[in-house]
Image (cartoon, rainbow, N blue to C red):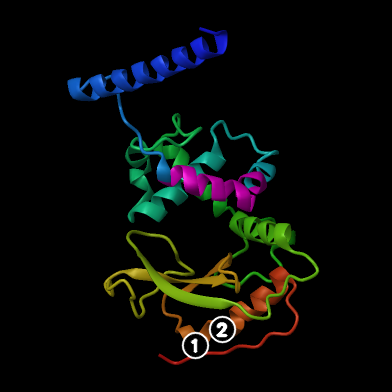
Amino acid sequence: MVSGELDRLAASVGRHAERAMVLDAIEAGSADFTPLRIGGPLLFGRLWERTGIREVIDHLLEARGFEFAVERAVLVATLRRLFVSGSDRDCVSWMGDYDIPGSADLALHHFYRAMAWLGEELPDDEQADATPFAPRTVKDVIEEKLFDRRRDLFTDLSLVFMDTTSLSFYGEGGETLGARGHSKDYRPDLKQMIVALVIDTGGRPICTEMMPGNTADVAVLVPIIDRLRARFGIGRVCVVAIAA
């Protein structure tokens, strides 16, 4: 038997042995064997890389002294929101079922610190075109840098799609945004904020904007158009609104 055939036979035997070990561990209920899901995080992880989010976040973090993987914490929190709803408090237990590279050492306080960083207010000299109720934050810079990455001579935002929803919350905080209004998540007893998502004609998200919880949809259009003009250099704009 030639050497190449021996190598192929050895590789085949090795793969069979690995499968047998996995099956034996499952049948025996071994505590040393914990199957992890890979499909969702693998797919969205690649989209995360292709859109440039990781590179943008890592660049913004270069001058910061965080001792944990902030970008990984943002990714895990995003993945969890894609798969299930609920508070970020459950991120740690949720991610234990998934194989997400670089996330093994994340703890609950890391997720809180990562979210606080996203909402960190920019310096006064970077607050141009901020709204009276929502200052410019790190989140805005990330959106603008992601848009710049795909901007070219043909980039055009003369037509965008926007939808709004209400986001209710418990506890204190949200003094400038929290208010009672028409609750789209059926919690009129709680204060809420209005979140607007803007996407382009290709279905790619451009940005999110937040307004006080008692803001009617019709009152959102003009302020958001003004913000889009300032943030993304939009020229002529045509608005088409459909009454439901």
Q: Measured along the vertical axis of the image, is residue 176 above or below residue 142? A: below
Q: Residue at x 58, y 52 (%)?
A: 120
Q: Depth check: 104 or 18 in front?
A: 18
Label 2 to label 1: alpha-carbon separation: 6 Å
In the figure, is residue 151 to the left or right of 43?
right
The quadrant holding residue 232 is bottom right
Q: In what element is the residue under mark 2? A: helix
Residue farthest to the right?
153
Q: Depth check: 226 or 213 in front?
A: 226
Which amino acid does the dot numbered 1 rest on?
Val
Q: Which residue is mark 2?
A: 221
In the figure, is residue 4 to the left or right of 243?
right
Find out whether residue 52 is within the magenta segment. yes
Q: In what element is the residue under mark 1? A: helix
Task: In the rendered structure, find residue 170 and report the number of the disc placed on it.
Answer: none
Q: Are marks 2 and 1 in contact (CB under 8 Å)?
A: yes
Q: Which residues are magenta?
A: 40-56
Q: Position of residue 126 (x, y in %)?
A: 72, 60
Q: Position of residue 215 (x, y in %)?
A: 45, 81
Q: Which residue is mark 1?
A: 218
The quadrant holding residue 136 is bottom right
Which amino acid does the dot numbered 2 rest on?
Leu
Q: Residue at x 71, y 74 (%)?
A: 156
Query: Quick check: can you spot residue 58?
Result: yes
Residue farthest to the left?
28
Q: Measured along the vertical axis of the image, is residue 26 above or below residue 85? A: above
Q: Residues within 10 Å of mark 2 (few under 14, many from 20)?
A: some
Q: Depth check: 144 or 65 in front?
A: 144
Q: Depth check: 97 or 89 in front?
A: 97
